[in-house]
Image (cartoon, rainbow, N blue to C red):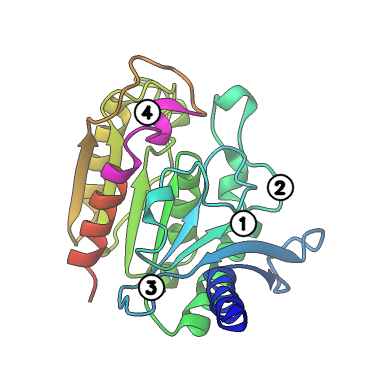
Amino acid sequence: MRIIILLIFAVLFSSELNAEETIVVKCDIKKCNKKFPLTATRYYKANPKNNLPALIWLPGGPGIGSSIDYQSITSLENKIDIIIMASPYKIDGKNHRGDVPQAYSKDLTTRTKTIVEFYKKKLNKPIWIGGHSNGGPRVVEFLTADKDNTKTVQGIIMAATHVGPPGDPKIRIKLLKKYNLPTLVIFHERDFCNNTQPSTQKYLFKSLEKRNENITQLIGLSQGVEVKIRSCDSGHHMFASNRDEAADQILKFITKHSK
């Protein structure tokens, strides 16, 4: 009996290990910065019966983390294959203000392309790409850096995207020109982080809608207990108390618009 229990425990423990895996990918092509030859990713495998595409996620803030914990998509774990891509260097501006020029670097956009191609081959399934806050500019620049990059993904998720302070066009996010991909812009109605406020998310939506030949959807969330918090590290900016609501909306959009 003891042996059977140990075997069951071993199988369960093994399954848990296989559900989360750190994978390092080489970035050794021309535009990659030779100082950073590797890109760290964390792969969270969904239920094997899941037939949805995989989601590559570009985190906010400095962009260097690869854990799904405490992220805006935490509640998506196990529901869809998720790959968190870490930047090898910090990309955020001082005190979360101003633009994020590193997000537009040739190195980072090329590095993102290597991750998309690696996981398309590894998983043999379509890829969606999404980003939160400072991850949003990374998504946009990846898609604009090479016209063929839009053909490598099936859709886009833009969550609480770093656009810039309301009424200051000097540091507005760079935008895609013409493209054809299902695009979700999702935010919280009480996000008061300086660069991601509701008015800027609506600006982003209208700008993308004009350029997108596919569906562009805007979703403003309202659940959660926080009040007017200006933090860019917690609160409504991170969907801290309504991550299930955020996950449900993102999953519905991906499911509906996947081929």
186 and 111: which is toward the camera: 186
Q: Amino acid at mark 1?
A: Leu
Q: Are marks 4 and 2 in contact (CB under 8 Å)?
A: no
Q: Position of residue 190 (x, y in %)?
A: 30, 23
Q: Which residue is mark 2?
A: 89
Q: Position of residue 256 (x, y in %)?
A: 17, 65
Identify the mark nearer the N-term, 2 or 3: 3
Q: Is residue 113 left or right of residue 39?
A: left
Residue at x-position 50% and y-position 71%: 116
Quadrant in which the C terminus is drawn: bottom left
**Residue 241 belongs to the span the image colors magenta:** yes
Q: Measure the alpha-carbon separation of dots 1 and 2.
A: 10 Å
Q: Are marks 3 and 4 in contact (CB under 8 Å)?
A: no
Q: Measure the alpha-carbon separation of dots 1 and 3.
A: 30 Å
Q: Amino acid at mark 2?
A: Tyr
Foreground: disc 4 or disc 1: 4
Residue furthest toward the top?
Answer: 228
**Residue 111 belongs to the span the image colors magenta:** no
Q: Amino acid at mark 4?
A: His
* Range of magenta residues: 234-245
Quadrant in which the N terminus is drawn: bottom right
Asked where in the image residue 258 lies, by quadrant, the reply is bottom left
Q: Which residue is mark 4?
A: 236
Q: Which residue is mark 3?
A: 47
Q: Which mark is residue 108?
A: 1
Q: Amino acid at mark 3?
A: Asn
| Tag 2 secondary structure | loop
The answer to whether residue 241 is above or below residue 79 is above
Disc 3 crowd, CA 10 A, few/some/many (<14, 14-19, 20+)? few
Looking at the image, can residue 163 be seen?
Answer: no
